[in-house]
Amino acid sequence: MQIETIKDVLSWTVDFHKNLKECVTHCSKQNQDERARMILNYVSGHEASLERMVEGFLSTANRNALDTWCYDYIGKHPIVEHGHCDSPFKELDTDHIMEKVVNHHEQVIELYEHLYSRVDIDSAKELLETVKNVEENEIKRMVQTANRFSDM
């Protein structure tokens, strides 16, 4: 995917969540640990929710913000194509599953922080900060819920 505008970054983020959702769904059917399967199914549902949330920004965000060019920033902070399924979720326990999921999300958050620090347009800054905050809050919520699964 060629990333040139913030709209492209949002589209990439939607694909990120979709890909992770599909990967953990696939792996949940193959993991032998019941708790791990529960976590993978939870993560799958949560990723579907995040996919819809970010998609919502594509249709409701300020057009000027979405059309803000960012390709020169991306060149210095490249987007890594989705490699979620390179991680063997089907063989991991709950702690390692969450570690990998959090790591993937931290990379997305770092991208939004980097772009935020580089853009000058207020509407673009606001959009990037909003999406970053959604990502941060949702990963915190996901980790808290995963910790509750571990307590069971």
Image (spheres, helix red, strand yellow):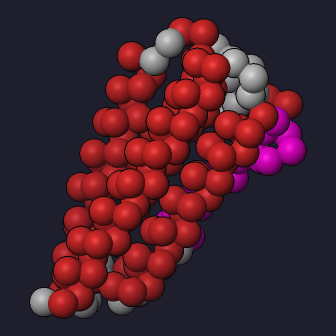
| Quadrant housing the C terminus | bottom left
Please name the residue shown 55% across and 69% down the image: 103
Please name the residue shown 29% across and 72% down the image: 144
Does the magenta run of residues contain 82? yes
Q: Is residue 87 left or right of residue 48?
A: right
| Quadrant housing the N terminus | top right
Asked if one can make out residue 51 in the rendered structure from this viewpoint, the answer is yes
**Quadrant position of residue 60:** top left
Residue 119, given in percent of the width and then of the height, sits at 74, 28
Decide which of 125, 27 is in the foreground and name it.
125
Please name the residue shown 62% across and 58% down the image: 107
Decide which of 1, 43 is in the foreground and name it.
43
Q: Residue furthest left?
A: 152
Compared to residue 33, the image places residue 63 above or below, namely: above
Decide which of 110, 28 is in the foreground and name it.
110
Please name the residue shown 41% across and 45% down the image: 134
Compared to residue 137, the image places residue 125 above or below, namely: above
Compared to residue 152, the image places residue 13 above or below, namely: above
Residue 29, given in percent of the width and then of the height, sits at 24, 73
Please provide the residue range marked out in magenta. Answer: 73-86
Q: Is residue 129 left or right of residue 28?
A: right
Does the magenta run of residues contain 58? no
Residue 78, given in percent of the width and then of the height, sits at 77, 47
